[in-house]
Amino acid sequence: MLEVPINRIITLNDEQPNMDAPYVLYWMIAFRRVNYNFSIQRAIEWANKLSKPLLIFEPMTIDYPMASIRFHKFAIEGMQDIQKQTEKSKAFYFPYVEEKRGVADKLLIELAKNAAVVITDDYPTYFVPQMTAEAKGSIQTTYELVDSNGLLPIRIAEKEYVRAHDFRRFMHKNIEDFLVEVPEKDPLEYLNLKFDEKLLEPIFKKYELVDFNKVNTQDFLNNLNVDKSVEISDIVGGYNAAKSRLDLFAEKGFNDYSKLRSHPSEDASSQLSPYFHFGHISTYEVFEKIISNESWSVENIDPNFVGRREGWWGGSANLESFFDELITWRELGYHTCVKRANYDQYQSLPDWAIKTLDDHANDEREYIYDLSEFTNANTHDEIWNAAQNQLKTEGRIHNYLRMLWGKKILEWTPNPQIALSYLIDLNDRFALDGRDPNSYSGVFWILGRYDRAWGPERPIYGKIRYMTSKSTATKFNLKPYLEKWSVGSTV
Ligand SMILES: Cc1cc2nc3c(=O)[nH]c(=O)nc-3n(C[C@H](O)[C@H](O)[C@H](O)COP(=O)(O)OP(=O)(O)OC[C@H]3O[C@@H](n4cnc5c(N)ncnc54)[C@H](O)[C@@H]3O)c2cc1C
């Protein structure tokens, strides 16, 4: 098994491993998967080195910001898959969905007391960095954060990149090593010692171990005191669903990706973002699938195209275009969140954007809606309402319409600060892929992040890039999309 690269590991304290403790603990909080996961791999490294078995603890708290039955159901489907995947392994998997606030934290403290080493996930946004930092006070043994977010380690850049073009250049110059240092497909195969469940008997007297493949998930969810106004989506969570989505994409959508990805009525994009957000699948696995389909290898790389959107990978137009989203755009968001503590604040926008938005803050708005009108897709614009309806019902919006959706919120609110707060609320509350570094990339892009000034200067937008429903309707055949998602349509 390849050693986890050192630039993916942060040691959070100076403690030595507790050799008297009976197991190594992997506290799984962001990379909720077994395959291609550097965190699990690091935990196995420690377990084998110290001759200890491995306990994988995956909690789901009840009161995290924006918690709802939609996200709980998606996460539990992930747990069901991991439960099946680990059944025959030597590790012990303990999924825990909190029913009362604070219980999962207490359970973590109890499990950590008996851990020789604690490993957890290094995720740069949402409540996670604060939670992992706070846990330091309760962990009296070696405690490490491991980064399995993407192809590039999230902390290797020395500076912040404020334009995709510059980040792409940096990525092209640095990524080759990380195409070799790949996480193991099935790290559990390397684990030496089997976990003896008896070790957890005292814990199971206090905390119930639920087999999510045996309980009725619907009943379980109904009994949880969690927001049910954000309803369950038909999109199924978990590794198996992610893998099926990937297979389908590789077989069909990918072949038209560069041409059709922006067409709202087509299914040409991968639709993998919810699975990336919940950590149900690794971008390494997606990368490997695509390159094996194209028989691509690092020899294809053409250094003459460093920094260019197309050409550097030396692959098909579809591969170039897909990797630009999957790697350049996705990982830029992670790097920004690492480098910029105020990544979710209005003041993090570029100076030119703040200035132009300020200059136009008092411009007259033809339409103004409040959060409840936006939430209920109750505007004058059929396309906007359809996009919001898809977000509210299904938990996603097609990427092109997501841009239009965001631009109109800027246009139809009293000022850009209110627009930002509505954008974050709606995106994080309803989107399965929300609460992610790329939520902030997308939402802040609406207001100028990663973009440049555009002319002519317009009311409300100033020099911020402008979009209209009319031009969207001219550009694409929206009929099938509107038939499906217009408010009042039967889906
Ligand atoms: C207002 C707004 C809000 C957004 N909120 C989110 C969000 O909460 N979570 C989220 O993951 N993305 C967000 N995005 C970016 C983008 O809409 C989604 O990543 C993309 O639509 C996901 O669909 P897909 O998986 O089919 O993408 P594909 O086209 O198949 O791309 C593959 C992967 O590349 C990444 N990617 C694609 N486009 C972008 C992009 N523009 N920026 C960053 N990464 C990208 C995603 O991880 C995606 O799954 C937002 C964009 C906007 C304009």
Image (spheres, rainbow, N blue to C red):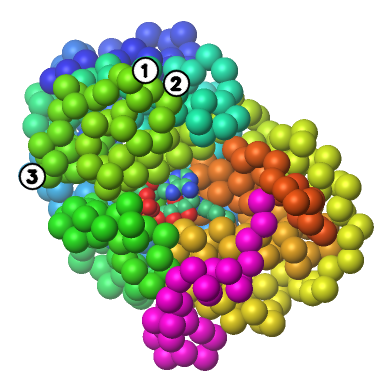
Q: Residue furthest right?
A: 362
Q: Is residue 292 left or right of residue 479?
A: left
Circle 1 Cα neighbour tier, 10 Å, few/some/many (<14 / 14–19 / ≥20): some
Count of numbered labels shown in the rendering: 3
The image shows residue 455 at horizontal and vertical percentages of 72, 48
Residue pictured at 87% horizontal, 54% vertical: 361
Q: Are marks 1 and 2 in contact (CB under 8 Å)?
A: yes
The answer to which of 162 and 220 lies nearer the viewer is 162
The image shows residue 233 at horizontal and vertical percentages of 40, 71
Instruction: Decide whether residue 289 is among the magenta residues.
Output: no
Q: Secondary structure at mark 2?
A: helix
Residue pictured at 79% horizontal, 41% vertical: 354
Can you identify the residue that label 1 sits on?
174
Which marked residue is nearer to the observer: mark 1 or mark 3? Answer: 1
The magenta stretch is 465-491
Label 3 amino acid?
Answer: Lys
Q: Secondary structure at mark 3?
A: loop
Q: Is residue 374 left or right of residue 4?
A: right
Q: Which mark is residue 88?
A: 3
Label 1 amino acid?
Answer: Asn
Mark sitting earlier along the chain (3/2): 3
Circle 3 Cα neighbour tier, 10 Å, few/some/many (<14 / 14–19 / ≥20): few
Residue pictured at 62% horizontal, 40% vertical: 451
Q: Quadrant of the C terminus?
A: bottom left
Q: Which mark is residue 170?
A: 2
The image shows residue 490 at horizontal and vertical percentages of 42, 90
Q: CA gap, disc 3 to disc 2?
A: 42 Å
The image shows residue 29 at horizontal and vertical percentages of 40, 41
